Image (spheres, grey):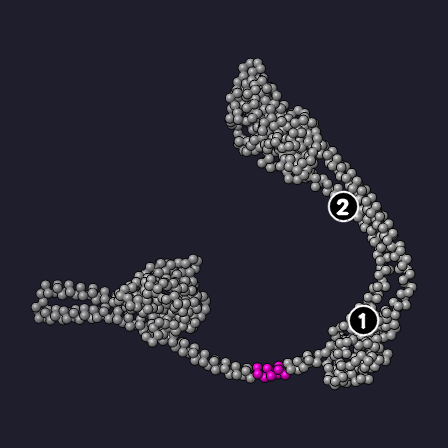
């Protein structure tokens, strides 16, 4: 592979010295011509720039005026068409008024009758004309009969309308009067009224004929024109200055007063048509060019306005193109002149630049913070070394320059040099190639060599740098030894950890076995307490039953003995029968009570011992649990009230629910009422949202201190330590509610007031195997 060769900056020195004598006279001539030429070029640049700017400004302004003139012409054409449309519509409405008036005079004859006028108005009002909304006959009192195809004929009081009020006050006014736009009272459609006095055959004013022109008839036409040209088109009166219609159409502009606008003054000059520019006319926010035309027959003016941004859009594009072209021409001329000035300047600076480059390279080479050396490839001798190389290896510059590395035994192993040279020749450079050199004091140095071939006056040379990594390699060796020691320590600690884990596993199994035994003991203790209570409760009805039965047996034997001896009297037999009936009833009641206790005990005992899942009524289950709990507080000053909502059906585990309630009651009696001679407990149930039920237990005992409330559900937490308390009761309750029943439990207690435990359960318990509750 051919070697990559770069030019050596050291060769510049001789080239500069040889050419310096020839270059100086030429630079002197350039300096003589430099200032006059530069001033002349700058003057020409300024003159050309002024000419280009003046010509461009004149063309742009001329183009703008032509664009606005063309727009004014187009706008005047548009308003003439609009004015013609408005005038024809109003003439047609006026002719319709004349036709109705003529028909009324012809039908009335010498004597005017209002009913005849109304019938004629109805006949004409039902005809179909695109502009016609309604025809009205207004009597001299201002009462109107309105006829339209759009709604039924009806009467209305219209004397408040400005046009009607004017004609009522001026009976001699013969011209048609244009009123203010208003919404039709029947369907709120906007209309423009045109009215004229009605005279009979004798010239007496007998009423007013008014025609309501649909504003939509104007708005539809104006909207098409406005949409096609992105303009504002309007029709307004020239006298009073109110807007009849404006497009784009908005109802809020109808009947808007324009007379106070500064531009409206020019409409009072009776000029037939014209144009102006304004940014606020017709409540617009854009500068627009408006053209307008006045109707010669009616006091109305049509206007057509386009925003200046739209009008001048093409002009701006042309202006931009002209400016770009002018800028391009000016830039091209400026670049040419600048290029000439730059070339003159560069000729002057080239010599100084070459000299600075040489000095900079020498300075960089000598002051480099890494060892640098330059070696001639033909004989492998050192050409130059920098100060850092001398300081690093301990040699003087005279000891190295002109000698090879073999002469002063630089390489620790000369065989390492050959692979480096082969790599250098093959690719033209070496990068971070590890080598081992010997300092002058005999110490060894591990270095990373990086270098490149270069050409100096046709001679191949090798410039390279060395980075000492001896300390780094020592650190790496220390790290490898430390890693080996750490790995050995990790293996030893891993073995000890595995042994410890095995011992912990055995301890965990033992603890779990003890845990299950404690939980079973707690459950059996609760069941034993239940059995003892039920047995005590059964003792009374069973004892009463034995007493009644023995009494009945004795009385029966006495009656049998009297009957056998013939001493049985009627009164004795009747008394025996009465006692037998009363004893039988008493016996039946006591046995039924015992049966209820046994039935409740059986169901509760089965539920608490089997953890069987089934569907059940929560009210019935809690009532059965309450029956079995009664002996635990019977004969004490404590009471249990229940408010159980009916109809709460659960698909869950009744046994855990009973055990939870049992623990609540037991805790209240044991802890809550400690030191008190009275106490009330309350058990409530209710629906809770979608698919949940709430069991709330409250006692008015001494409460729980705030510091202990967070630990109530912890295993082995009890205030009766050493007094028979295991500290597992509420922990078992917590695990039954959360793990088995799939619910949640909260505690709210205030010292001296009492404690409330709230359990929220799903109506359908989670689908999982029932397991023994674990100690949390």
Q: Which element is circle 2 on?
A: helix
Quadrant containing the C terminus is: bottom left
State the predominant SS element of the stretch in magenta. Answer: helix
Looking at the image, residue 106 lies above or below residue 67: above
Q: In front: 618, or 243?
A: 243
Q: In front: 427, or 686?
A: 427
Quadrant containing the N terminus is: bottom right
Residue 654 visible here: no
Q: Which element is circle 1 on?
A: helix
CA gap between label 2 and label 1 equals 54 Å
Mark linked to residue 735: none
* Residue beneath disc 1: 362
Classify residue 410 by image quadrant.
bottom right
Q: Which numbered disc flags the more N-terminal residue, 2 or 1?
A: 2
* Residue beneath disc 2: 320
Instruction: Name the residue at 59% across, 22% down.
Output: 196
């Amino acid at each position: 592979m051919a070697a990559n060769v770069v030019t050596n900056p050291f060769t510049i020195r001789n080239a500069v010295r040889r050419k310096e004598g020839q270059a100086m006279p030429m630079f002197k001539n350039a300096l003589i011509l430099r200032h006059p030429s530069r001033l002349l070029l700058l003057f020409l640049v300024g003159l050309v720039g002024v000419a280009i700017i003046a010509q461009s400004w004149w063309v742009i302004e001329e183009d703008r005026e032509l664009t606005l003139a063309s727009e004014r012409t187009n706008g005047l054409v548009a308003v003439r068409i609009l004015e013609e449309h408005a005038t024809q519509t109003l003439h047609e409405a006026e002719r319709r008024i004349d036709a109705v008036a003529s028909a009324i005079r012809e039908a009335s004859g010498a004597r005017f009758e209002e009913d005849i006028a109304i019938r004629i108005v109805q006949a004409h009002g039902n005809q179909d004309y695109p502009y016609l909304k309604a025809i009205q006959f207004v009597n001299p009192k201002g009462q109107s009969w309105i006829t339209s195809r759009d709604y039924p004929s009806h009467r209305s009081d219209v004397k408040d309308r400005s046009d009607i009020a004017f004609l009522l006050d001026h009976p001699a006014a013969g011209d048609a009067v244009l009123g203010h736009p208003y919404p039709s009272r029947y369907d709120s459609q906007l209309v423009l009224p045109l009215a004229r006095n009605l005279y009979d055959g004798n010239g007496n004013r007998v009423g007013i004929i008014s025609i309501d022109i649909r504003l939509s008839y104007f708005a539809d036409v104006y909207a098409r024109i406005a949409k096609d040209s992105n303009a504002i088109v309007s029709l307004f009166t020239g006298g009073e200055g109110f807007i009849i219609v404006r497009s784009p159409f908005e109802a809020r502009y109808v009947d808007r007063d324009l007379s106070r606008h500064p531009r409206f003054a020019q409409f009072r000059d009776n000029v037939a048509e014209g144009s102006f520019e304004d940014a606020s006319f017709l409540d617009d926010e854009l500068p627009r060019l408006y053209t307008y035309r006045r109707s010669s027959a009616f006091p109305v003016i049509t206007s057509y306005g386009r925003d200046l941004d739209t009008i001048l859009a093409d002009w701006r594009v042309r202006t931009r193109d002209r400016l770009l072209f002018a800028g391009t021409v000016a830039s091209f001329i400026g670049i040419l002149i600048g290029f000439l000035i730059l070339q003159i300047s560069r000729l002057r600076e080239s010599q100084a630049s070459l000299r600075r480059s040489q000095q900079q390279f020498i300075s960089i080479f000598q002051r480099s913070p890494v060892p640098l050396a330059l070696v001639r490839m033909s004989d492998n001798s050192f050409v130059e070394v920098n100060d850092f190389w001398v300081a690093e290896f301990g040699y003087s510059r005279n000891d190295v320059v002109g000698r090879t590395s073999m002469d002063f035994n630089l390489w620790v192993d000369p065989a390492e040099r050959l692979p480096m040279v082969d790599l250098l020749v093959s690719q033209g450079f070496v990068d971070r190639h590890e080598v081992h050199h010997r300092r002058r004091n005999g110490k060894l140095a591990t270095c990373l060599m990086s270098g490149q071939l270069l050409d100096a006056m046709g001679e191949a040379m090798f410039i390279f740098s060395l980075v000492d990594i001896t300390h780094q390699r020592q650190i790496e060796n220390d790290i490898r030894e430390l890693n080996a020691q750490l790995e050995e320590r990790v293996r030893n600690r891993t073995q000890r950890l595995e042994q410890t884990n095995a011992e912990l596993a055995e301890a965990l199994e033992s603890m779990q076995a003890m845990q299950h035994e404690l939980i079973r003991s707690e459950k059996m203790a609760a069941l034993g307490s239940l059995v003892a209570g039920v047995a005590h409760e059964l003792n009374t009805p069973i004892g009463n039953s034995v007493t009644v039965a023995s009494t009945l047996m004795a009385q029966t034997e006495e009656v049998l003995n009297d009957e056998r001896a013939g001493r049985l009297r009627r009164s004795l037999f009747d008394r025996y029968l009465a006692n037998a009936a009363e004893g039988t009833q008493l016996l039946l009641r006591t046995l039924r009570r015992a049966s209820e206790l046994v039935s409740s005990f059986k169901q509760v005992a089965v539920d608490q011992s089997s953890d069987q899942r089934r569907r059940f009524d929560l009210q019935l289950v809690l009532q059965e649990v309450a029956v079995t709990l009664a002996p635990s507080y019977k004969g004490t000053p404590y009471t249990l009230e229940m408010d159980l909502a009916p109809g709460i059906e659960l698909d869950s585990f009744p046994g855990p629910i009973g055990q939870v309630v049992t623990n609540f009651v037991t805790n209240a009696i044991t802890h809550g009422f400690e030191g008190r001679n009275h106490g009330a407990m309350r058990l409530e149930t209710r629906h809770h949202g979608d698919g949940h039920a709430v069991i709330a237990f409250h006692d008015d005992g001494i409460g729980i201190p705030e510091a202990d409330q967070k630990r109530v559900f912890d295993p082995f937490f009890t205030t009766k330590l050493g007094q028979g308390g295991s500290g597992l009761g509420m922990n078992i309750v917590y695990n039954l509610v959360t793990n088995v029943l799939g619910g949640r439990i909260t505690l709210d207690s205030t010292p001296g007031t009492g404690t409330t435990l709230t359990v929220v359960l799903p109506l359908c318990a989670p689908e999982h195997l029932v397991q023994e509750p674990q100690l949390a």
